[in-house]
Image (spheres, rainbow, N blue to C red):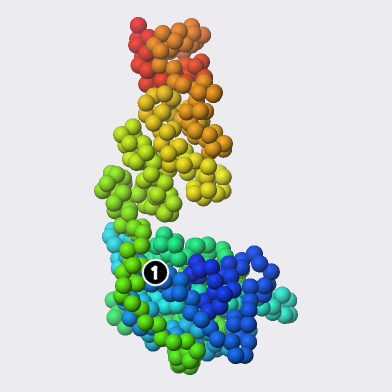
């Protein structure tokens, strides 16, 4: 165990799922668009242009704040955050500083043997910057992203391990996707992270010198950057040196941090209230309306799946991982009724269905199979119209064609053979063809029973009732 304790606070920038940008009517969805094609005089900062607040972006920020247990301010003020970069055409960013929309929240994460509460200082609304593309000796700027609504969520320095950091980010992403305010697509920059990290001697109450690592675009980058910084700062402290407060960047291809600029604080940005925008006054009735429209959150749903459906923590965690998956499961359980237990439905989903989804490379909600179709298949298996192996085969056909289970079973003649006379004849043919194996079984090699079952299933083209085959085989072999 290291003699130092890791202390981490996170700033997460999440793009909001609005149709238009934060302060103009340009489309906020420009991922595949030609550079600078989603721009206008407002987001290009032409002289005399005035911003107009996007109401839906404010609503989505409030939804996120409620989901993160924040207090929603009655008054919020936009501010100018001044710094000069080529991807900020105004020379400043419109953000919130002294009066943000959401404050004093928290997010529970799984940590060790229990739950740990991570405090959230604030969640505020701002506009995104453009994107710089470096090409050889020149840098090109694409302002399609400039002005896209951005939610910044700032945690307290409550995280004490890289595992806790990963759990926090995973849960935060899950919540934002669940409530429909963020796509969760890190590859497209929908979430970008900044980590404030320091080390201090264990059992010390005083925080160490903080460094900030900017613009981490994946959970993997966060993990690698933190691991690098822990090692770097440990070497400095062990040698008697002092960690310098700096802002760092992360070079993914080199696996190291680098200094971007020296000590930076809020006054460096020269915040002041945005003169072109009025204060936001948030009506309590609107907040209550937004709260009533929130979906059940992942951890609450996980707990309900455990208590209501008798699922294990691990199974429930998998099924609530994505809202569409959890919705599919609950609809399938309801449609299956008493034919199968919720645990059996979960097993079929997490086994055969998830495998087909993974192979397709598309999310479950884009599959051609519906919960009702899935329930129809499970009912056929439960009623022994088809056996489990045939059920897996039928499910694959359903997934590929969109046909119903009963249609496929009838067309391909897959109904399970449960006629004792038909099975007895198949068993007799198998035993007659393999007298040596029969002798070995009767000499005590009872593990051959499984082999005999496989032969009978092959004889019946996989349609035999396996439980009945097992029973009849044991009786016949013991004569």
Question: Which of the pair 452/459 is nearer the observer?
Answer: 459
**Residue 250: percent from the left, percent from the top?**
55, 74
**Residue 296: percent from the left, percent from the top?**
34, 58
Image vertical order of residue 268 relative to residue 292, above or below: below
**Residue 35: percent from the left, percent from the top?**
68, 72
Q: Is residue 244 visible?
A: no
Q: Is residue 296 left or right of residue 216?
A: left
Image vertical order of residue 404 relative to residue 478, above or below: below
Q: What's the residue at 43%, 39% (across, down)?
A: 372
**Residue 137: percent from the left, percent from the top?**
73, 80
Image vertical order of residue 304 relative to residue 12, above or below: above
User: On the image, which quarter does residue 109 sit in?
Assistant: bottom left
User: On the image, which quarter does residue 66 sit in?
Assistant: bottom left
* Residue picked out by circle 1: 64
Q: What's the residue at 37%, 13% (across, down)?
A: 472
Characterize the local packing of mark 1: few (<14), some (14-19) or many (20 or more) Cα atoms within 10 angstroms: many
Question: Which of the pair 87/197 is nearer the observer?
Answer: 87
Question: Which of the pair 327/465 is nearer the observer?
Answer: 327
Query: Mark 1: which secondary structure?
Result: helix
Image vertical order of residue 362 relative to residue 416, above or below: below
Which quarter of the rendered picture does the N terminus lie within?
bottom left
Q: Is residue 66 left or right of residue 149?
A: left
Q: What's the residue at 44%, 10% (across, down)?
A: 422
């Amino acid at each position: 165990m290291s003699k130092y304790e890791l202390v981490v606070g996170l700033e997460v920038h999440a793009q909001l799922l609005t149709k238009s940008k934060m302060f103009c009517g340009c489309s906020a969805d420009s991922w595949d668009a030609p550079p600078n094609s989603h721009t206008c005089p407002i987001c290009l900062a032409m002289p005399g242009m005035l911003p107009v607040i996007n109401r839906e972006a404010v609503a989505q920020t409030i939804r996120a704040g409620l989901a993160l247990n924040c207090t929603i301010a009655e008054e919020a003020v936009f501010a100018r955050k001044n710094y000069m970069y080529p991807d900020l055409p105004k020379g400043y960013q419109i953000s919130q500083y002294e009066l943000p929309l959401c404050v004093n929240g928290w997010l529970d994460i799984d940590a060790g043997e229990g739950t740990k509460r991570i405090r959230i200082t604030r969640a505020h609304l701002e506009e995104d910057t453009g994107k710089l593309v470096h090409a050889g000796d020149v840098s090109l700027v694409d302002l399609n992203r400039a002005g896209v609504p951005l939610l910044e969520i700032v945690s307290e320095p409550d995280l004490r391990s890289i595992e806790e950091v990963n759990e926090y980010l995973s849960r935060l992403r899950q919540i934002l996707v669940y409530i429909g305010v963020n796509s969760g697509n890190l590859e497209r920059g929908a979430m970008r992270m900044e980590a404030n990290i320091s080390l201090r001697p264990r059992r010390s109450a005083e925080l160490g010198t903080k460094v900030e690592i900017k613009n981490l675009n994946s959970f993997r980058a966060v993990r690698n950057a933190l691991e690098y910084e822990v090692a770097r700062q440990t070497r400095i402290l062990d040698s008697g040196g002092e960690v310098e407060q700096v802002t760092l960047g992360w070079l993914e291809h080199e696996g190291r941090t680098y200094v971007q600029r020296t000590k930076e604080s809020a006054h460096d940005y020269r915040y002041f209230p945005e003169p072109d925008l009025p204060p936001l006054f948030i009506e309590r009735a609107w907040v209550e309306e937004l709260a009533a429209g929130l979906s059940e959150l992942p951890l609450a749903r996980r707990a309900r799946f455990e208590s209501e459906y008798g699922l294990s923590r691990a199974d429930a965690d998998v099924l609530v991982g994505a809202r569409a998956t959890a919705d599919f499961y609950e609809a399938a359980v309801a449609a299956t009724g008493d034919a199968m237990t919720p645990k059996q439905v979960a097993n079929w989903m997490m086994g055969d269905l998830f495998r087909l989804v993974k192979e397709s490379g598309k999310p479950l909600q884009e599959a051609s199979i519906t919960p009702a179709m899935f329930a129809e298949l499970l009912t056929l298996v439960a009623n022994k119209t088809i056996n489990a192996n045939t059920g897996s085969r039928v499910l694959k056909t359903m997934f590929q064609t969109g046909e119903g289970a009963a249609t496929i079973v009838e067309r391909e003649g897959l109904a399970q053979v449960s006629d004792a006379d038909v099975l007895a004849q198949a068993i007799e043919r198998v035993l007659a063809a393999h007298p040596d194996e029969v002798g070995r079984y009767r000499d005590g090699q009872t593990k051959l029973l499984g082999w005999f079952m496989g032969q009978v299933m092959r004889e019946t083209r996989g349609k035999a009732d396996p439980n009945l085959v097992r029973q009849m085989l044991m009786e016949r072999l013991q004569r």
